[in-house]
Image (spheres, rainbow, N blue to C red):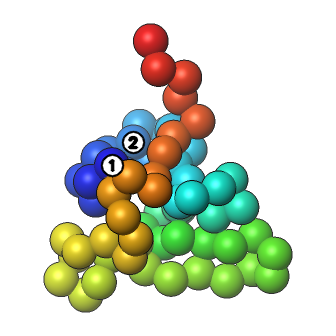
Amino acid sequence: MTAEEIKAAIDRGEKVYWKTTNYPVIKDSKGQYLITYLIPKHCIGLTWEDGVTLNGKESDFFTDKIPA
């Protein structure tokens, strides 16, 4: 998934993850997209400061939506 696809999925209310379901991607109250880690609670930005370059490979992101 690209950064834009990830952001769009989250904005539609879909759950997005990086690598495993232990790393949900969220949108915080400031509008930032963050890769979080559930245990211990920790997060990093979805992208670098350029807002485009992902902190991970596109192929490592997925949603909870079952493909049709």
Question: SS at mark 2?
Answer: helix
Residue 41, image quadrant: bottom right
**Which one is nearer the viewer's eye here, 10 or 40?**
40
The crowding category of the residue bearing disc 2, from other C-alpha atoms within 10 Å (few below 14, some 14 to 19, many at least 20), is: some
x, y (%) of residue 49? 25, 87
x, y (%) of residue 18? 53, 60
Q: Residue furthest bottom?
A: 49
Q: Residue at x 31, y 71 (%)?
A: 54
- Is 47 situated left or right of 29 in this image? left
Q: Which mark is residue 9?
A: 2
Q: Nearer the viewer, mark 2 or mark 1?
A: 1
Q: Amino acid at mark 1?
A: Met
Q: Residue at x 28, y 59 (%)?
A: 3
Is residue 30 in view from this perspective?
no
Q: Which mark is residue 63?
A: none
- Is 29 situated left or right of 55 in this image? right
Q: Residue at x 48, y 72 (%)?
A: 34
Residue 23, image quadrant: bottom right
Q: Which mark is residue 1?
A: 1
Q: Residue at x 47, y 20 (%)?
A: 67
Disc 2 vs disc 1: Cβ atoms closer than 8 Å? yes
Q: Is residue 53 above or below residue 2?
A: below
